[in-house]
């Protein structure tokens, strides 16, 4: 579905990513690495918010370098950003509806789609008239995921979904990702490697803008370098 080859990009004259070869098929893929490694930059390049200097980004064989973000969204890619970007002064249900509003293949199916999201997250149904900004951090994260799913994506990208959440909620978030695995391709960036490994099939480790390791979840779990640097107690 998503194929990246030889990607290089950055900000101004500062190079952030170099020689990135990266792929997401019908699977769930993790992108791991410390703060500042370039995870968000890679996602921004996929979403058309950072322009590639070199290399290609393809979606189903179609080159999307330089494509506008709204077109990429219409092609079936949804992002749950690191900053939640909900509309805090709007209700839960209005936030959900906005997730589909500008996506042609989703906007005719809003009522049925909302019911699906409510079935997945009963708390959102309970709170559907509540203002998004008054919900707890965990509930807002679920709402952000629900809103992204409203666009009926083929590829769901989540940028550090566990950030700032208490451990019990983190586990819930990864349970949700695990349950979504069979219906949508997933790309998730995380610093919390331990928790995410149970929700993904495969992962990449990004350090200083380069991919230093790519393996199955099982392979990463038992890799001495990963254990030492990312799973250490
Ligand atoms: N908008 C920006 N302008 C300039 N530099 C940026 C910008 N966003 C990120 N950077 C820099 O790019 C590098 C990678 O950042 P980022 O992609 O956010 O890493 P990560 O998501 O892995 O923490 C860092 O050195 C960061 O300071
Ligand atoms: Mg980031």
Image (cartoon, rainbow, N blue to C red):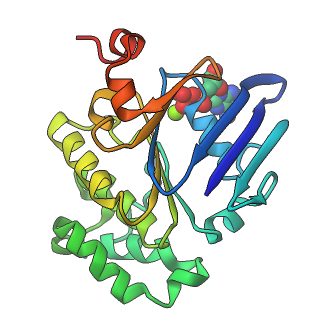
Nearer to me, 65 or 220 = 220
Nearer to me, 161 or 64 = 64
Q: Position of residue 196 (x, y in %)?
A: 32, 37
Q: Position of residue 95 (x, y in %)?
A: 40, 70
User: Is residue 63 depicted above or below 201 in this figure?
Assistant: below
Please state if 101 lies on the left or on the right of 123 as rendered. Answer: right
Q: Position of residue 192 (x, y in %)?
A: 34, 29
Q: Residue sitting at 85 percent across and 36 percent down?
A: 54
Q: Residue sitting at 44 percent across and 38 percent down?
A: 202
Q: Is residue 111 visible?
A: yes
Q: Quadrant of ligand 1?
A: top right
Q: Position of residue 229 (x, y in %)?
A: 39, 11
**Residue 69 image-quadrant placement:** bottom right
User: Is residue 141 depicted above or below 153 in this figure?
Assistant: above
Nearer to me, 150 or 197 = 197
Please identify the quadrant where the N terminus is shown.
Answer: bottom right
Q: Residue sitting at 80 percent across and 51 percent down?
A: 65
- In the rendered picture of this protein, how many numbered marks are placed on residues? 0
Q: Is residue 192 visible?
A: no
Please identify the quadrant where the C terminus is shown.
Answer: top left
User: Is residue 32 depicted above or below 102 in this figure?
Assistant: above
Please state if 128 lies on the left or on the right of 109 as rendered. Answer: left
């Amino acid at each position: 579905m998503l194929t990246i080859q030889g990607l290089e990009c950055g900000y101004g004259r500062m190079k952030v990513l170099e020689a990135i070869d990266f792929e997401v098929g019908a699977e769930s893929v993790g992108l791991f690495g410390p703060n500042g490694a370039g995870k968000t930059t890679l996602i921004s390049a996929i979403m058309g918010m950072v322009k590639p200097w070199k290399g290609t980004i393809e979606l189903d064989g179609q080159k999307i370098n330089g494509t506008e973000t709204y077109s990429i969204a219409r092609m079936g890619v949804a992002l749950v950003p690191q900053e939640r970007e909900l509309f805090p002064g709007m209700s839960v249900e209005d936030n959900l509806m906005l997730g589909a509003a500008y996506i042609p293949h989703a906007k005719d199916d809003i009522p049925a789609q909302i019911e699906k999201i409510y079935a997945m997250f009963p708390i959102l149904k309970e709170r559907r008239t509540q203002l998004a900004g008054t919900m707890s951090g965990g509930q807002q994260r679920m709402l952000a995921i629900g809103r992204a799913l409203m666009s009926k994506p083929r590829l769901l990208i989540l940028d550090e979904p566990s950030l700032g959440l208490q451990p019990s909620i983190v586990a819930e978030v990864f349970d949700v990702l695990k349950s979504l695995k069979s219906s949508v391709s997933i790309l998730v960036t995380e610093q919390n490697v331990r928790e995410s490994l149970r929700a993904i099939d495969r992962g990449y480790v990004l350090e200083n803008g380069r991919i230093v390791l790519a393996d199955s979840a099982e392979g990463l779990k038992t890799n001495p370098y990963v254990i030492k640097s990312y799973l250490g107690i």
